Image (cartoon, rainbow, N blue to C red):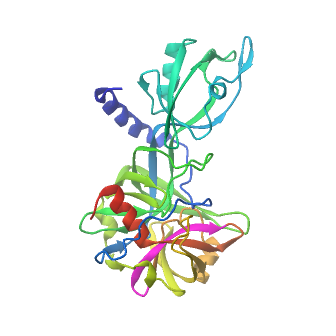
Amino acid sequence: MSETVKAPLRRRRLRRWGALALALVALAWWPAPAAADSGEGSETQMVVPLGRAVGIKLFSDGVVVVGFSEIDTARGSTLPARACGLKEGDIITHINSVEVDTIEEVRAVLQDLEDDTLSIRAIRGEKELCLTTQAVQCAADGDYKLGAWVRDSMAGIGTLTFVDVETGMYGALGHGIRDVDTSLLMPLEEGGLMYAEVTHVLKGEAGTPGCLRGSFEADHAVGDLAVNTGRGIFGQLTDRALLEGGQAVEVARPEEVETGPATILSNISGDEVKEYTIEITRILSAASPDGRDYTIHVTDPDLIAATGGIVQGMSGSPILQNGKLVGAVTHVMVNDPTEGYGIHASSMLSTAHEALGAL
């Protein structure tokens, strides 16, 4: 697809944002990728810790296969998508020579081709695949289909961790935005941050994670989403009003993080950020492959009363200790919402450096 076609498409996709169903950008409960270089030995970095809840929108680069469903035709049931070799988690980028980034585009191409033989270009991990199949006509509605459920976008609430005052670069979540069905990182074509307010808290209980619920202002963008990585999302903050009252602090090196008292900044009501007490209970190996750098325990009675501890939407809440930013809340222990994990702030920062360039 040429750029002259893709530019109007992107504007159309942003306009239809308000109609998307909410899919929580939630705390990760699955292993994260291996830790990035901590940046040890680099010069001191100063950032403003925020703890501010924001709406996050993401449109995928291609469409993600999240499941399969048999199609009833005049000749019986069939499933061409699976038969040609597609698997859950594959990212369809082209059908024949046509680039597809939305569900609507996939449907339109299939109707144009009808029952012609078609080629599918898809990405699986680091590999690019080329598969051949035919769409079949559904007996119920007459549409041509492949029998694959696909996803092209996600939305939800997450927490801004830090912003560099000089450059405007932000880091958030402390983990990537993953597809809710496949648990794979969503491939990013475009996205952004929106102003949001927390309207309700579903408290976490043992075995049942809670969540923050809120309302977005789709026409009030506060930042651009540039990259989606296993150690957080990063981009440029465009609304400097979110920095009002914030004070820059030093980013701690991993060896400076210690067990003992700490605090988190979190936004669990309206747009108000408050500081809550926690305890860093255990420092894990720096070589840990799953990105869980240390364990935390919520001790603040007000936070426990309001949320039960750590809930979905709080991922990215900055962790402060000894006057420095030491990390962000990333995971919750499902059997005890007062327990969770944190990621080193230096790991998030080094990942941002690699993805966006040095500050």
- Report the magenta residues as a range: 321-333
The N terminus: image quadrant: top left
Q: Residue at x 44, y 41 (%)?
A: 17
Examine the image and state in which quarter residue 245 appears. Answer: bottom left
Q: Please, which residue is most extreme toward the right here? A: 76
How many discs appear?
0
Our reading of the magenta stretch's main secondary structure is strand
Q: Is residue 105 magenta?
A: no
- Residue 116 seen from this side: yes
Examine the image and state in which quarter residue 21 appears. Answer: top right
Is residue 271 left or right of 210 when viewed as pictured? left
The C terminus: image quadrant: bottom left
- Residue 309 seen from this side: no
Q: Residue at x 55, y 64 (%)?
A: 289
**Percent x, y of residue 305:** 64, 77
**Percent x, y of residue 171:** 39, 63
Q: Is residue 327 magenta?
A: yes
Q: Residue at x 33, y 77 (%)?
A: 41
Of 351 and 249, the residue lying toward us: 351
Is residue 238 left or right of 280 when viewed as pictured? left
**Percent x, y of residue 173:** 48, 62
Examine the image and state in which quarter residue 199 appears. Answer: bottom right
The image shows residue 88, relative to residue 306, as above or below, that is above
Q: Residue at x 31, y 33 (%)?
A: 7
**Percent x, y of residue 160:** 42, 65
